[in-house]
Amino acid sequence: MPDNTAVIRYNLFCANFNQGAFAGFLGKLGFMKRSRQDIVKLLASGDLVPAQLVQIRCAIEKGLTEAQLVELINNNVSAEKMKEIIDIAVLENSMDY
């Protein structure tokens, strides 16, 4: 009769597996997501002034999503306006929907 213990352990492992934690682990190993590399390319090829780049860095530090970062970069708004948009995005991201 086969040992079902291994099957049960595997099922418990799969049920408790946190994909976000696994992605974070891969990121720490150097497997960067393609979209993060695209953001760097956008910044390098864009016409942003240093004050705007500072705001983008601030947005990254405050945890804006990649989609939010891309919008900030592509819309090429002033650094002052970026700061306000970042503050609004941080507030929006912190709200439970």
Image (cartoon, grey):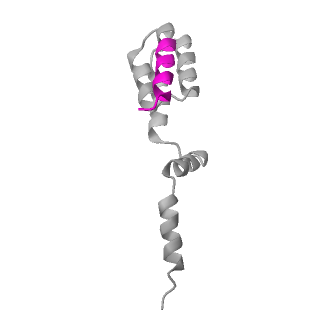
Residue 22 percent across, percent down from the top left: 54, 52
Residue extending furthest front?
96
Q: Does the magenta stretch include residue 89?
A: yes
The quadrant of the picture occupied by the C terminus is top left
Against 48, residue 15 (above or below) is: below
The overriding secondary structure of the stretch rendered in magenta is helix
| Residue at image location 46% in from the left, 31% down from the top | 65
Residue 1 percent across, percent down from the top left: 48, 92
Quarter of the image holding residue 63?
Answer: top right
Left or right of 23 in this view: 73:
left
Against 46, residue 37 (above or below) is: below
| Residue at image location 45% in from the left, 40% down from the top | 34
Residue extending furthest bottom?
1
First to last magenta residue range: 82-97
Against 44, residue 27 (above or below) is: below
Residue 50 percent across, percent down from the top left: 56, 13
Residue 82 percent across, percent down from the top left: 48, 13
| Residue at image location 51% in from the left, 66% down from the top | 12
Q: Does the magenta stretch include residue 22?
A: no
The mark tally for this picture is 0
